Image (spheres, rainbow, N blue to C red):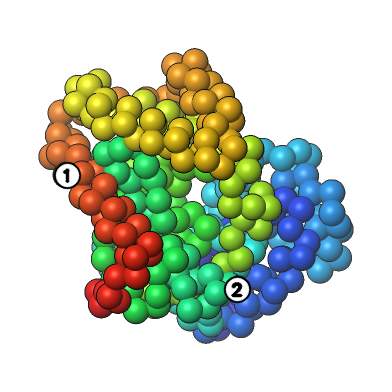
């Protein structure tokens, strides 16, 4: 065991997550798979996290200020020297076979960029939290399976992108497609990097045997708040501008506009309409600073497949929403 080659670095970004760190790291130390190391990236915490990490002698990169999720995980990925990296939120507890199952899943093919775990709600353990992230032609990103019963999504399969809250990535692919976009700071950065991988011809998978229990919004504090609404609205503009060639943007302009309008109505009911519009227009003003994916005709089939998935993603969203809202019969899949 002592001579076993380390294959995986588990990177935990932390910002004032003192109350989550100890149970998260304890669950990692109970893993059946020993060939990994833990690396925490602390984003300038002021709640005692940094002192605790030093006291426990946990391998940590200490950043002087909060660089957001994207900045923190990029530092961790660049510091890693293993073929695989697992990105893990601090507000999770993982099963004893979590690392082993993710390594097994991604090892199936070199064309797999990422593998998303089966995330269950910590405080409602009969409900799913995420089974891979999806994107739709309306410009809506969403957590597949969120709020559904545990009988949903019990089989492995392809997803649009992995949820970076608990997923494994093939490290060398980042050198090809680029790292997490630090203009995002936080929110939708995992959809963006998964989108770029799909354009380049890689797959993103969901692997239900890798189990995670997730508190949710452990760092930001709530499902919807001014900060999250504004950043997500801005980053949604970046996501489309960067990854869609001009012709695809033109083709999808009407459904994206409809999606923006519906989102505005939704946030107006919650009292966040000003934050949503502020973020949206900031995205319009600053999108030119983003590094766009250069169109390559060799990837035309990938773009066509993505377009079909965006259309399917809208139908899946409606189906899941209807199932949650009206209590559809449980789905076995």
Asked whether 319 or 202 is in front, the reply is 319
Q: Residue 76 placed where, x, y %?
A: 60, 50
Asked whether 52 or 222 is in front, the reply is 222
Mark closer to the chain start, 1 or 2:
2
In the rendered structure, find residue 308 and report the number of the disc placed on it: 1
Q: Which of the 4 image quarters holds residue 182?
A: top right
Nearest to viewer (mark 1 / mark 2): 2
Residue highlighted by disc 2: 123
Q: Residue 130 placed where, x, y %?
A: 44, 63
Quadrant where the C terminus lies?
bottom left
Asked whether 169 or 271 is in front, the reply is 271
Quadrant where the N terminus lies?
bottom right
- The residue at the point 31 percent across, 53 percent down is 317
Q: Which of the 4 image quarters holds residue 150?
A: bottom left
Asked whether 58 or 224 is in front, the reply is 224
* Number of marks in the rendered image: 2
């Amino acid at each position: 065991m002592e001579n076993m080659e380390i294959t995986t670095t588990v990177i935990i970004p932390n910002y004032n997550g003192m109350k989550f760190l100890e149970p998260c790291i304890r669950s990692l130390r109970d893993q059946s798979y020993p060939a990994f190391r833990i690396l925490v990236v602390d984003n300038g915490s002021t709640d005692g996290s940094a002192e605790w990490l030093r006291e426990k002698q946990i391998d940590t990169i200490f950043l002087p200020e909060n660089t957001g999720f994207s900045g923190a995980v990029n530092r961790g990925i660049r510091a890693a020297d293993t073929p695989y990296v697992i990105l893990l939120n601090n507000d999770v507890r993982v099963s004893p076979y979590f690392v082993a199952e993710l390594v097994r899943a991604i090892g199936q093919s070199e064309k797999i960029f990422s593998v998303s775990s089966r995330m269950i709600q910590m405080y409602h353990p009969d409900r799913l939290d995420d089974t891979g992230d999806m994107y739709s032609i309306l410009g809506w990103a969403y957590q597949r399976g969120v709020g559904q019963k545990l009988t949903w999504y019990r089989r492995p399969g392809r997803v649009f992108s992995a949820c970076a809250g608990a997923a494994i990535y093939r490290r060398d692919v980042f050198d090809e497609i680029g790292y997490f976009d630090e203009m995002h700071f936080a929110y939708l950065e995992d959809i963006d990097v998964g989108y770029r991988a799909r354009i380049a011809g890689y797959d993103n998978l969901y692997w239900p045997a890798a189990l995670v229990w997730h508190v949710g919004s452990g760092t930001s504090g709530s499902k919807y708040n001014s900060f999250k609404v504004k950043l997500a609205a801005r980053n949604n503009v970046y996501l489309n501008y960067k990854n869609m060639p001009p012709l695809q943007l033109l083709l999808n302009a009407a459904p994206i506009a409809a999606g923006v309008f519906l989102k505005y109505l939704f946030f107006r009911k919650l009292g966040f309409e000003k934050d949503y519009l502020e973020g949206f227009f900031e995205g319009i003003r600053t999108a030119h600073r983003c590094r766009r994916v250069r169109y390559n005709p060799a990837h035309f089939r990938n773009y066509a497949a993505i377009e079909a998935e965006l259309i399917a993603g809208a139908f899946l969203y409606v189906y899941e929403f209807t199932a949650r809202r009206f209590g559809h019969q449980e789905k076995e899949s």
